[in-house]
Image (cartoon, helix red, strand yellow):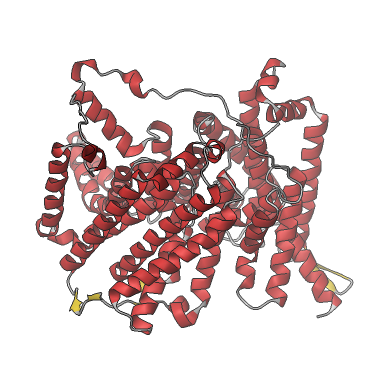
Amino acid sequence: MRFIFKTTYRQDLGLFRDRYQRDWYIALLLGLLALPFLLPDYRVDLSLMLIYGLCGVSLMVLAGYTGLVSLGHAAFLGIGAYAHVHFTQDLGLPWVASVALAALVSAAAGVLVGLPALRMTGIYLTIATLAFALIIQAVFNRWDAVTGGLSGKAVERPVIFGVSLRDDTSFYFLCLAVLIAGLWLTRNLLRAPTGRAWVAIRDSEIAAQSMGVNLAIYKTLAFSYSAALMGVAGALFAHQVGFLAPDIFTVLLSIQFLLMVVVGGLGSLHGAIFGAIFVALLPVAISEARDVLPDWLGRLFSVFGQDTGFAVAAAVDGFVKQPGLEPGIFGLVLVLFILFEPHGFYGRWVKIKLYFSEFPLYRRATFKRQKSYARSERLR
Amino acid sequence: MTLGTVLQLLLNGLAVGCIYGLVALGFVLIYKTTELVNFAQGDLMMLGAFTCYMFTVWYGIGYWPAFALTVAVIGLFGAALDRIVLRRVIGQPQFAAVMLTIGLGAMFRSFASMAWGSEIYTLPTPFSAKQTLVAGVSVSHEYLSIIAGTVLLCAVLYGFFARTKLGIAMQAASQNQLAAYYMGIPVKRMFSLIWAISAGVAAIAGVLLAPVSLIDTNLGFIGLKAFAAAVLGGFGSIPGALAGGISIGLIELFAGAYLPEGINDVVAYAMLLIVLVLRPQGMFGTVGRKRV
């Protein structure tokens, strides 16, 4: 266990806890810079992972820090994507201005949802955001002039300050830069009074209100900030998919974003990134497993004879080729995490770290979950 | 616009609304007792429709035995779901249960597409493609069966909750768990039973809906519209759920007929948002400030 002695205020202001932590993050950055050259086949998936990271950060601010669970974040992503494509391709704005405008449009939509949200709590809010997302999806379907309607809209490669990012590697670096900027902004916002007010609202609205936190302002702010980040992510996402169609921005995508923050660990930015890595890589892992798994299991079971091996391989092959498998696995993962590790990957990581740093003295009870009876939210 | 068309729309809207109402009823039953919101209710309905199809067409037992068997199977499944999975999240934040049921819903859809394939089925019933002409309006028996089934089910449920000892014990458990424990009511068993009833109602809704709609794995998305119904009626009121469902069904059909195209897809959700903004307690509900 390493103790931090704070001797100057500068230490409180710094982004990192100490220089070891800073060095680790620099190492991570170097690793990320080298990654597209180490894994050339997966460049597309890697940039998707970074974009999902931004989406995760966006939803984490809302769900993990402010306690407002939104089931409509795919709509904000879609608004950002369509706005960006409309501004660059139809109106001919420069890329950077267009992304900023897309973020603004998305943030305005966030305010639109956030204002009625002031009167709702908990489950009502979730349902309201869901309804909003479904309406927005219908708008995407119908508003041909901007969205191209059902036939969709092709997206050109980004051109920034006259430089065209043609290949996947440069797009990866663009996504990385945007993600780091977003993380930096969010991290600083969360340490500032704004972030503290958000956390206070999450922990108890009534207590926050009594401490002088203006619920209306901070909830709307959380919604608009989250939506703005989602708008930027949407602009990148548009380039990533290359073709926008309304059926991309469905409820299922919103659920995937929620899965991301839950699996990663609610209430930590690390969690958002862990979740994004997980959600982006799971389909890749499943498709790899589709090719490899039947063969492996077949070989494994051929110790019971050649025929058993073939039979197992055929059965497994039939199973993993089922088209509906992927959402089911997502659902299963979600269920298992909620039941057994509600703090997600980040919670597990904290536990493992503590285990080693306290090595012989680790107590399991440190993280023991309190059992409680049903807590009524109703007034009786 | 003739009187005949209006009557026709009224009838169809009533039938569709009954389905929304039944699914909403399932939400409300579970919400009232356990304070969990079950996002998988629509998917339970989808499972019900598929199960009934499997019994009638694949195994060739008649419609009525298949109906009864389906309700029993899905009801048992609901109880098992409560015992094995959902009981563990009681006492955790509401959000945990929401995510859990969303995950379960995804698993059900995946399971359905594996077990029954991704084809689209139609359920043959005794009242398929039969019509009666009443006052110039052709009344299809399928729609009638939905309305009759809903009325019957509501009467049975009302009798159960108001007249039987078990029903009153359930009411007690939903009103105050601790007091119910003190009175010797096995609250956990009541919860499982409520889940069974709620899943059974979803299965009935699925079987009733199957002849007029087609059975596929996306049938469960009707659950989203049933949310609108439940919220419209006040999320915790049983008559409210039915009234909300019927209102949503009628609004949707009339909007489809008289408003510009495309409105009818979203009118339910727009209603939901309007209700949440203007009157969050819905038509019948009571919402107070949260206890500190």
Against B292, residue B122 (above or below) is: below
Q: How many marks?
A: 0
Instruction: Write the residue at 39% across / 64% down.
Output: A231
Q: Quadrant of residue B68?
A: top right
**Between B262 and A357, the one nearer to me in the picture:** A357
Farthest residue in the right direction?
B135
Instruction: Write the residue at 72% across / 16% down.
Output: B183
- Residue B134 placement (x, y as % from top left): 87, 69
Q: Quadrant of residue A163?
A: bottom left
Against A306, residue B268 (above or below) is: below
Give the position of the N terminus of chain B as an image quadrant: bottom right
- Residue A218 placement (x, y as % from top left): 49, 50
Against B96, residue B263 (above or below) is: below
Examine the rendering and report whether any part of residue A251 can be seen.
yes
Instruction: Write the residue at 29% across / 52% down.
Output: A183
- Residue B236 placement (x, y as % from top left): 69, 42
Instruction: Write the residue at 20% across / 47% down.
Output: A295
- Residue B174 placement (x, y as % from top left): 69, 30
Examine the rendering and report whether any part of residue B142 can be seen.
no
**Between A13 and A349, the one nearer to me in the picture:** A13
